[in-house]
Each structure stands twice: as C-alpha cells, then as structure tokens.
Image (cartoon, rainbow, N blue to C red):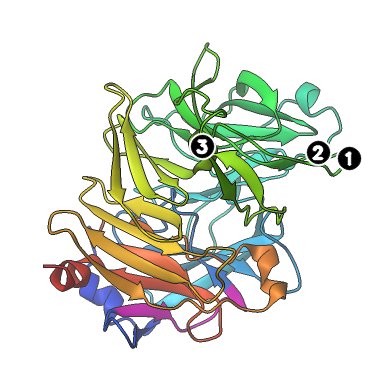
Amino acid sequence: MTPSPATLDPKAILESPLVEPWTDPESGVTSYLLKHDAAPLQQSFYFVNPSFSHDGRYLWLYCAFPPGGLANSGRTLAVADFVENEIRHFPEINFLDASPMVAPESGEVYWCDGTEIWKRGPGRYDLCQLINALPRELVNNRRPWRLATHLTLSADRKFLNIDATLGNETHIGAAPLDGKPMEIWQTLHAGFNHGQFSPTDPDLQLVAQDSYIDCLTGEIHSFQNRMWLIRRHGKAHPIYQDSSNGPKVTAHDAHLGQPSREVADGPGMHGHEWWGADGNRVWFVHYGRGIKFIELQSGHEELVWNFDGVSHAHCNASGSLVVADAQPQDRPKYSKVAFLNRETGKSVEIVSFVPRLDARTRRYHIHPHPQFTWMDRFICYTTTVNQRVSVALTPVDALLAATQ
C-alpha cells in the first residue's frame, strides 16, 4: 500500500476522482459528494464519531444493501482512500447500532458485532481482530440489542465505552483494549444509551435516558430527564434536576414512531448531546428551542443558536462554529442542513432542502447527522440531494468565507 502522507492537502480530497461537486441552488454553498458507490446506500458516521483518520487519507462510511439490514443491525462498512483513490467495501464487518469508531492515528475502525468488539485496518488485506467481549455469565444465552450505541475512547486511551442492552436492562461500563474483562459500572433499565467517554476524564461518561421498547410487551416507554453522568465506581445521576412539573409542550419521537406526547419543556426535551472538547461543556439540542451547552463546573447554560426545527447538531473543537440539521417529523417539506459562525453571528445553509426518500429507507435512519471532522476542516453529512443516499463533504474554509 502507498505510504500515507503526514497530512493530506484538503485540495487533494476536493480534486479526487472519488468526489463530485454539488452546489446548493439557493445558498450557493458547494459540497463534494462521493460519486462511486461501494453500496446502494451509503451514510456518514454518527455525528459524535469523526469519519476521517487524522491524516485525511481515510474516510469511513456505513453501507447497506436494501432491503437487507436496518439501523440497528445488518449494515457494513467501506473506506474511501484518498491516496489510492478507491473505495473498499468490507462485507465481513456487520455492526450493531451506530457503533463504529475510527482510531484517528491509524485509520483503523472499531465496531460492535453481537457481544463482541472488533477492529480492522483500512487496507484491502488487513485482518479483523477481536478486542473484547461481554462476559458469558452476563449474556446468559441472550442476544443483545446493542453492545455500545457508538464506541468512544477513554481519555487515557485504555478503554472503550459500553452501554450494553440485554433484555430490559442496560449495563454501563468499559471494555479494556488489552482484552481484560469488561467493567460493569452500573446496571439500569433499558432506556439508557448513547454513552460517551469524557474527552478529558478517563473515569467519566455521559449517558442518555431515551425512549425504549419493552422487549417482552412491545410497550414504548418515554423519559422525562435526558442527560446523565456516571463515574467509575459511582452511580449515574442527571445533569439537570427533574422538571416534570414545569410547562408542558408536545414532543415528537422520530426514532420509534410513537404518537406525539406531552412532556415538560425541560430535560425531557433535550437530546443528541455531545461532549465539548474541554470536557467541561456538554452540548445538546433543546427541541423546540435550539442548540445549547451547559458548563458542568459552573452550571451555566447558554442558548447558542435558536434554529427552527433543529434535529441534530455538532460543533468544532473551540465551540466557535456549529452545524445542524432540521428534520421535524411534523413538517416533511422543511428539511435542511445549516452552519453558524458564532464569531460573526451569521449562518448559511449547506443544503436548503434535504429530500426525504421513500418509506423503505426509514429502516436505516436516513438523517444528515452533520459532524465536524478531520481536525474541523470539513463538515461530513449524509446526503439525499441526487435521490441517492451517500456521503458529502463541505469545506469549513468556504463556510467561513460565506459567513464573514
């Protein structure tokens, strides 16, 4: 394989034969779409896990071959190599949930399959390696719904997080990279997921309380308090106090398809949270209001962007730039991806209208899920603008120029 350069010039990606430009007809912003398909359906990684290796050579993507697979299981992975200018599909990778994580220095990818965590390199002939597995006595002949919603690396780079759901229980803990037995920090009901290691504290995780389906009855259980912290050797506790007695609003659940519900306009309307790079701020979407962060040390909360209909969001390492998508369940003709420059207060639409495809694609959870990636050089998101589901890249420099 051709040696990887220390860092690719971003122009090498924009001029690669693997991508083609697409310009939004309203905003004039140009994105670069993968034009060669490893699969009929391609998606960017879940927004808390960067899709690129640090050198910019490898861009990993989810793949699906409809009608096979769904958002929880049955998808595979491919990698776009911007040195060899080819996309390689790996059918041996069959991952659960949105678990894949790129090891930034090596370009290797980790994923969950059944009760096990695996990894492999981006090379055509690299081998899969077993990293760890849930203990047999915990699994007890059961099939997991997930092992980790999305894998993240601990700050000391010794563990991967787990939020393993078996039956109606979720086991929060950590999987040592050296193969030692997994740690179970606490067992909670099945509605806890989206675990993420703190980027600065190896003993701290952010977890989310979410709606979930009872595996025996099919009943959907809702939640009133979304974001929680858990420390090794401790118990999970909410970031916000429960405000279930506060003013009520109507909430829509786009994931489980349950009917609209009445919930307090507080922690029950929070979602799609992520750590700030400093390990102090937790960023999140407050549905119906916009994008916020809370500082854990001071308790200071700030509304950063009052973005109508916001569904998902992400920020760069400094928190000066924000990207978000809008996919409100009750407004199918309103759907976009937009960028905010907090230093100038100006925003621009990356995609002024995101087409929603036919109902058969819903099983794959086709949302843009925009993320800052490759050292904040690009926005990476899932696109449907050409009536195909694939991956798009937008240079951050161009967005900065558009928001001066």
Q: Secondary structure at mark 1?
A: loop
| Residue visible at 35% across and 33% down in the picture | 199
> What kind of residue is marked 3?
Pro
Give residue 192's quadrant in the image: top right
Label 1 close to label 2 by CB (< 8 Å): yes
On the image, the x and y values in percent for residue 297 come to 29, 21
| Labelled disc at residue 141 | none
Q: Secondary structure at mark 2?
A: loop
Give residue 326's quadrant in the image: bottom left
In the image, is residue 241 above or below residue 160?
Answer: above
Q: Is residue 34 magenta?
A: yes
On the image, the x and y values in percent for residue 271 come to 50, 44
| Labelled disc at residue 217 | 1
277, 220: nearer the viewer: 220
Residue of label 3: 247
Residue of label 2: 214
> Taking 191 as reference, is 37 left or right?
left
Determine the CA span between mark 1 and mark 2.
6 Å
> What kind of residue is marked 2?
Asp
| Residue visible at 42% across and 71% down in the picture | 336
On the image, the x and y values in percent for residue 246 come to 51, 31
Residue range (magenta):
30-41
> What kind of residue is marked 1?
Thr
| Residue visible at 50% across and 51% down in the picture | 109
